Image (tube, rainbow, N blue to C red):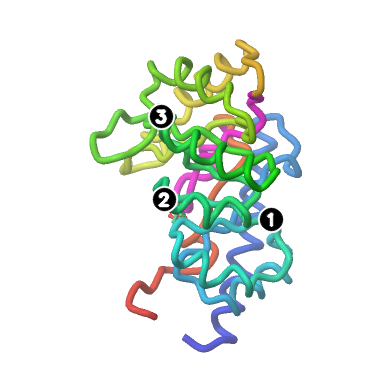
Amino acid sequence: MTEKLLTENFDRNFAEIKENIEKAAKKAWKNPNDIILLAATKTVDIELINYAIDSGIEYIGENRVQEFLSKKDGYAPCHRHFIGHLQTNKVKDIVPFVELIHSVDSVHLAKEISKVSLKLNKVTDILLEVNIGDEESKSGFKTEELEENLREIAKFEGIRVRGLMAIPPICETPQQNIKYFSKMQKLFIDIAGKKIDNSSMDFLSMGMSGDYACAIENGANIVRIGTALFGKRDYTKK
Ligand SMILES: *Cc1c(COP(=O)(O)O)cnc(C)c1O
């Protein structure tokens, strides 16, 4: 696709998504400005990402370490998040350059982020990933083990737990997702109510291209959107 078509498509997609976010936020009695639209930028060329940032995208998220490292010096100013599975041996490559890690799925990983952050004299914000569909193939804490693990992680210095993240099972319709989103919302509210030291439930990161409106209606305040913004991913490039 030509550059011009890509940016025109982006403009149209972005306008539509902003409108949908606004509608969903209003349904949930929330201020649309409190919903963070995070552009999931995997496989997207840096030129298009920077066009998006120029157009008003403030948050971007990468999910592969290698790809993030190859792009990181090229991004226009923006808030950078890491949203993918992170191995402990890659923590030192990511921590210096991101504001929030969405996908902390073990005590072991949290401990490593703590260690690296302390060395850098920084406090890294993290979200705990919840395996809300209890799927074998997915990472994340089981709902029934979340509180216990959060209590342990919250003790580590150099990190601050800021909320929860989930990738629910693939559903046929957004309606089927409601079940998982509302389970997450309940879990989020329950955990927030426990007021665990060194943790605050500020962010609930859930909802992607096909179901972000539904996620917002069920309490999400960060939605991670790739395809609906940038079009279908081309994995054959590069
Ligand atoms: C790619 C990705 C998204 C965005 O997915 P789309 O369906 O393209 O919107 C969201 N979250 C994570 C963790 C991702 O890797």
Q: Residue at x 38, y 34 (%)?
A: 140
At label 3, the amino acid type is Tyr
Q: Pick whichever of labels 3 and 1 is earlier in the sequence.
A: 1
Residue 173 point in image, percent of width and height: 36, 42
The residue that label 3 is drawn on is 180
Kindly state the secondary structure of the residue where label 3 is placed.
Answer: helix
Kindly state the secondary structure of the residue where label 1 is placed.
Answer: strand
At label 2, the amino acid type is Asn
Question: Is residue 214 found inside the magenta-colored segment of the image?
Answer: yes
Per the rendered image, the range of residues in magenta is 199-217
Residue 100 point in image, percent of width and height: 61, 45
Viewer-nearest residue: 13 or 205: 205
Left or right placement of residue 60 versus residue 131 in this view: right
Residue 89 image label: 2
Residue 83, placed above or below residue 68 = above
Left or right placement of residue 217 versus residue 25 in this view: left
Residue 60 point in image, percent of width and height: 60, 58
Q: Residue at x 70, y 29 (%)?
A: 29
Q: Given the current orientation, which residue lies at the most extreme top position?
A: 194
